[in-house]
Amino acid sequence: MLSQAAAARDAVLRTTHELSGSLHIGAEQCLGFVDVNALLERVRRRYPLVDIEFTQAGSRDLVAAVQAGTVDLAFVAGDDLGPRVVHHELGRRPMVLLAPPQHPLAARDVVEWSDLRGEDFVDFQQSWAVRAVSDEAAAAAGVGRQVRCAVNDVHTLIDLVQRGLGIALVPQHVASKPQAAGLAVRPLASPAPQWVVSAITGDASAASAALVLELLDADLALTA
């Protein structure tokens, strides 16, 4: 009944000049391909009557929230988005190896999966998409990983790699951060895991979520 009431409200909102109501947006930290903070600012300026809530969480938790209807629109990473979501892919790039410059793998032109056996890794907690992508790719290559440090912050991961606590598999935009300057960035041998970023909504997405996607499409068209 609540879902039907929300759908009826959104149908009315589509016919008005001023969009109002509530919109709950979620995003994983440091996704790349989309500037979530700038998008939130645009939505606030364009639709001042919309009550915006924002949640930062891991992609796994955000997918579950969209499926449950507690988040209207989420920006997540990974290929396995599960049922009951509609996804809008924003981009994909291969992941890379991040290592201290003195590490033996820093001298390689391309890092083979077999080179990663026995290495210590710095990675994210299980709810982060990057952790799932790395674990699945390593398992497919028959490589067991020892994650010695599990974090919830990109800059902490970079700092731990700089301090020699381990190597990391990261999206290219993370390796390009100013904080990672001086670290070795090396491509992974094929098949390199892909970092895929998408915007997702529920099957019956809110009208306000659809309008945010329209704004996002306009931004991507301008920057393409």
Image: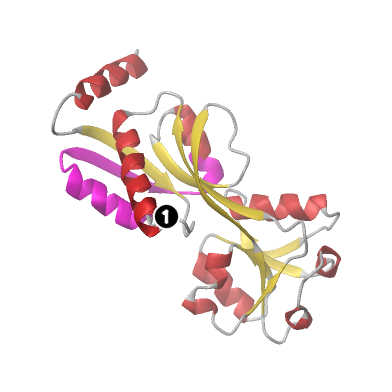
Which residue is situated farthest in the bottom direction here?
Answer: 102
User: Along the horizontal axis of the image, is 14 left or right of 143?
Assistant: left
Q: Quadrant of the C terminus?
A: bottom left
Q: Secondary structure at mark 1?
A: loop
Residue sitting at x 46%, y 56%: 33
Residue 97 position in % (x across, y down): 68, 69
Residue sitting at x 76%, y 77%: 109
Tally of numbered tags: 1
- Is 41 a magenta residue? yes
Which residue is situated farthest in the top direction here?
Answer: 1
Q: Quadrant of the N terminus?
A: top left
Other residues around mark 1 within 10 Å, as few (<14) / some (14–19) / many (≥20) = some
- What is the quadrant of residue 166 in the picture? bottom right
Residue 200 position in % (x across, y down): 47, 38
Image position of 139 with respect to 147: above or below? above
- Is 46 a magenta residue? yes
Question: Camera-side residue: 155 or 134?
Answer: 134
Q: Please give the range of residues in magenta.
A: 36-62
Question: Camera-side residue: 72 or 121?
Answer: 72
The three-letter amino acid code for the residue at tag 1 is Val
Residue 102 position in % (x across, y down): 71, 87
Residue sitting at x 66%, y 51%: 133
User: Along the horizontal axis of the image, is 112 left or right of 81?
Assistant: right
Residue sitting at x 25%, y 46%: 43
Residue placed under numbered mark 1 in the picture: 34
